[in-house]
């Protein structure tokens, strides 16, 4: 997956916004003001792209056991976040599913009011 594909896929999620809340390097995607994906642009430029994604704790453990390129997230809650190395052993299609999973976890954590505003922004 290249940066443009990653960027467009994340932004295609309903209600998603992009931010640089930490520095000029870390691109963060949020839904309802809460992060669901973040990645270092410098790492992409170096050819070593990685993304941090939220994950169900039990599923996070399973993924880490199954893939060497999925590890506890750096500078994040190790229980709820994974770092996934991109363009290595995790196929792009599966990475898209992990982005979906992260987005859905965060979306479901929002209040019903916020969810409805995202789904029907009239």
Image (spheres, rainbow, N blue to C red):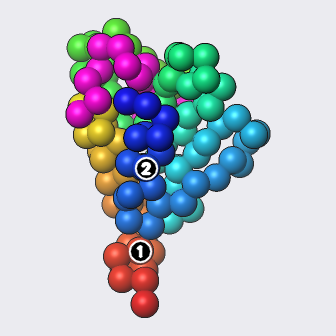
Q: Is residue 88 left or right of residue 22?
A: left
Quadrant in which the C terminus appears: bottom left
Q: Is residue 1 above or below residue 7?
A: above
Q: Residue at x 53, y 16 (%)?
A: 48
Circle 1: element type: helix
Identify the residue position indicated by label 1 in the image. 118
Q: Is residue 57 magenta?
A: no
User: What residue sits 30% from the left and 45% below the top?
Assistant: 101
Q: Which residues are magenta?
A: 76-93
Looking at the image, is 25 positioned above or below residue 28? above
User: How far from the left and from the top, in percent, is residue 65?
Assistant: 27, 13
Quarter-wise, where is residue 56 in the image?
top left
* Residue at the extreme right: 23
Tell me if 52 is positioned left or right of 116 in this view.
right
Q: Position of residue 86 (x, y in %)?
A: 41, 22
Q: Residue at x 30, y 14 (%)?
A: 89
Q: Local crowd at mark 1 within 10 Å, few (<14), some, or many (≥20)?
A: some
Provide the secondary structure element on which disc 2 rests.
helix
Q: Which residue is mark 2?
A: 8
Q: Is residue 48 above or below residue 94?
A: above
Q: Mark yes or no: residue 30 visible.
A: yes
């Amino acid at each position: 997956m290249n940066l443009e594909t990653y960027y467009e896929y994340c932004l295609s999620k309903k209600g998603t916004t992009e931010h640089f809340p930490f520095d000029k390097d870390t691109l963060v995607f949020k839904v309802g003001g809460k992060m669901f994906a973040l990645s270092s642009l410098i790492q992409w430029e170096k050819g070593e792209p990685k993304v941090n994604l939220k994950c169900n704790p039990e599923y996070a453990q399973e993924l880490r056991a199954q893939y060497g390129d999925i590890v506890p997230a750096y500078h994040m809650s190790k229980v709820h976040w994974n770092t996934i190395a991109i363009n290595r052993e995790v196929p792009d299609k599966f990475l898209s599913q992990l982005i979906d999973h992260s987005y859905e976890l965060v979306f479901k954590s929002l209040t019903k009011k916020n969810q409805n505003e995202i789904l029907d922004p009239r």
